[in-house]
Image: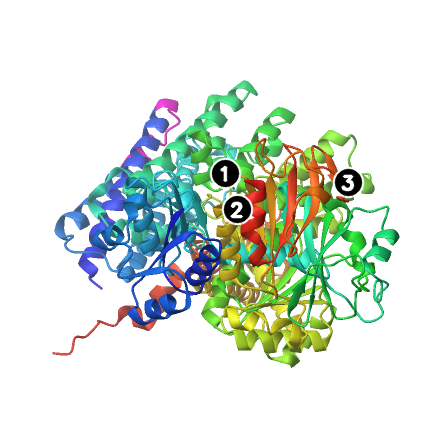
Amino acid sequence: MKVLILGAGEVGFHLAKRLSEENQDVILIESDPERAEFASQQLDVITVVGNGASLPILEKAGISNARMLLAVTSKDEVNLIASMAAKKFGVEHVVARISNPEYYGKGSVLSQEQMGIDLMINPERECARETFDLLRSEIATDVVPFAGGRIHLVGLRIKEGAPVVGKTMAELAADLHDHHYATVAIVRDGETRIPRAESKVLAGDQLYMLTPTTEIADIAPLAGYKSFGLRRVMIAGGSAEGEYLAEILEEEGVECTILDIDRRRCLELAERLPRALVLHADATDLELLEMEGVAGVDGFVAATSSDETNLLSSLLAKTAGAHKVVSLVHKFEYLRLVPRVGVDASVSPRMSTVNAILRYVRRGHVVTVAELTGTDAETIEYGVGEDSEIAGQAIKDVHFPKNAVIGTILRGDEIILPRGDDKVLPGDDVIVFALPDAVPEVERLFD
Amino acid sequence: MSLARVANVVGLLQVFVSLSMFLAAGVGFVYGDGDALGILLAAVVTFFVGGFTYGITMFEGELTPREGFAIVTMAWTAAAAFGALPYLFTGALDSPVAAFFEAMSGFTTTGATVFTDVEALPHGVLFWRSLTQWLGGMGIIVLVIAVLPYLGVGGMQLFKAEVPGPTPERLRPRITQTAKLLWLVYVGLTAAETALYLIGGMSFFDAVNHSFTTLATGGFSTRNGSMASFDSGFIHWVTIIFMYLAGVNFSLHFRAATGRPVYFRDHEWRFYTYIVLLAALAIAAVNLASGSYSGLEPTVRDALFQATSITTTTGFVSADYELWLPGAQMVLFALFFVGGMAGSTGGGMKTMRVLLLIKQTAIELRKHLHPRAVLLTRVGDKTVKQEVLANVTGFVILYLLLCLTGAIVLGFLGMDPLTAIAASISSIGNVGPGFGNVGATDNYGWMSDTALVVLSFFMLVGRLEIYTVLLLFHPETWKARRSFH
């Protein structure tokens, strides 16, 4: 499949990397020659230098026979123009990254259909939504809904002295026979492993588990945490992400304090957020954070525009006793740092965008896909068709790649934790956890 | 400031005042009790003086804000001066000061009267009394703007200076259209009330007069006992409802009339309604407990009547509230300050200002808990600008200071403290009755000329919402703006 990607920023670069690794033909359009040069050296893609909103450049990139356009520059207008052009050329799937809320929804001059856009993504809003899911899921580092929200993939960091520490997968499965947990991955020292029956859980591991949504609350004690409800949240930084998050919290009836260093921004926030408490303060002013009760908050989110400030602010809040601390991280390189500095979880608007777009790209037989913090692995939900190679076979008979595992089979309302004898039937939804090198093989099995 | 321009507009406004006098003369003529000629003479004098002033001056260029303030203040003073003539020329009153007071009380919709026996007055004079209130209720200038577009853009200056409330709203892009719509609603409600009074058994003359003074939240009556003279529960309930409606922002009525009833969404409306209902509930409870009333309906009706009448600053009475227990009286006393909604015909401080002040105070308290918090005052989902809040705070302080000043001056004139305080507050709030010697069943006829002049001034200051009048006393208003060459 020929995919045009507009913009070789972090989002575009990352998408290009992912898709080229999965053997798609990627053409990257970037206006900055240096950035384009860097991309063509690092990635197995064609790069075209120029403005993605101009016709000659789009034609040069071969828009007439492209099947998909991902317009992900940081400029909304460029993305919009390119998307409208793409539809004229008959590009099948058009995805656009749009940050300004005035360009979509009710306030928009043209509807999404008129603009010819199949998927619009607002990175900041996507990121705020993800942050809220993280906060609500108490102790998790990742929370991703699958199967329309019936199942969640939950990532947790195991505490010292937690009940699961030292147990093998087989023992864990025996302990949890009443429940529907499936452990799909263990991340240790930055390396992702697919667990075998004899793999042991150690303190400090990051565990990824698939679990029915109704049983999420039971996970916390396993990992050594007390469970708690979300009542008070403090947001340090009035960025777009912070504001969207405060909006969600207001809607959900969670008490919310948001602070920003810029007085005019504070006035804007106070105007738009009638119920939140807006403070004019610095995100790293520990004395103020303590006075405003950071020690008692259920969630603390560092959401300024500076990654360094966010990490520092998160650490201060964690030290002061905030229950769950989430940091906004823009630079992809910093994401790996998050587990090491003791912050509970991180979110990134760009990562959220990449996730949302990959989910869309693999649409069709693939239902949902998620990329996770601190690992390259993906969780993918496949719909099994009549002519899928895997259909009708028992799992033990399928030659399934070593770096992938079937986490859950969904058959109607039934949730099945597969054993070797279980069969995959047409019409099932199957959630697979896979390292990148295994993805093409898994795709082939389900295609 | 161009005095010629000011005089031009003021003169024209007096022509309008004279036209309404001709109407009163007509009424006098129809009833034929001997006052028609006196009123006609007053009308002719007013017409020629006003017309002459208008004729010899020119209106050119644009109105400046200070000219706007000057025009409104002077037009109202002149209206009261000329409005006094019918009382003098018909012999209803001998003292020019008392006549000026009566006319000012009329135009400002206060309802304080110097007459001991209104029932002895001829029909024409009674009608003129009620008519001054009806004109003053929606505003003489608003009426002129509605029918005469010649003021152009400057009309907004005058409109702002005359319409009560912190920020007058426009219903239509053109100020003339807005003024027309407001008058249309006003006339419609007056007609509706008249019809209901007729059904309730009032004479046509009484029905029209009381409708005029209800919708204007004025309070002049054609009977010595005010509303208590009508021994009819139905008439009292009708009065309660229309006093209440007159205290509501007329833009809301207009929206309702065009099929968009948005009362419930309006936060000031809710606040205003709560105040009236809560006060009435408190009064009814006290009166029930005291055992001075028999029957639930009369207790509730009288409590609601007095609470609505004082809150909207109408000043009708259906019962002598000075006979109530002190608790019930103090509830009424508090209501003297509140007033109707912004954009209503009611006086007082206006519920919007009270609401904003309460919200502002709550925010100041919260700031002590969160010193770095950025807190905004909102009414509904709208944020109130800092300048408006400062203006409101200034207004309320000025209002209370004036109440105090008035009471002190009246004290120096020899009045007892209760009467002095009540008369001062009642005049500034354009209510009418008060406590002590200006209580529910008393009048202002016994006061000295000095006291009547002082109170006339306070009534005007209250009706034009302080700033408009006081600006004329600010030295800078009279300084010419100099250019640098």
Q: Could you say whether the residue bearing mark 2 is in a helix, strand or loop? A: loop
Q: Nearer the viewer, residue B182 or A369?
A: A369
In the image: residue A320, left or right of residue B399: right
Percent x, y of residue A446: 58, 41
In the image: residue B357, left or right of residue A159: left
Q: Nearer the viewer, residue B401 or B388?
A: B388
Do residues under tags 1 and 2 come within 8 Å of each other at their CB atoms?
yes
For disc 3, the chain is A
Percent x, y of residue B204: 47, 22
Residue A172 seen anywhere in this rendered image of the structure: yes
Q: Could you say whether the residue bearing mark 3 is in a helix, strand or loop? A: loop
For disc 1, the chain is B
Query: Residue B246 got which mark?
Result: 1
Percent x, y of residue B45: 24, 42
What's drawn in magenta, residue-wise?
A: B30-40
Amino acid at circle 3? Asp
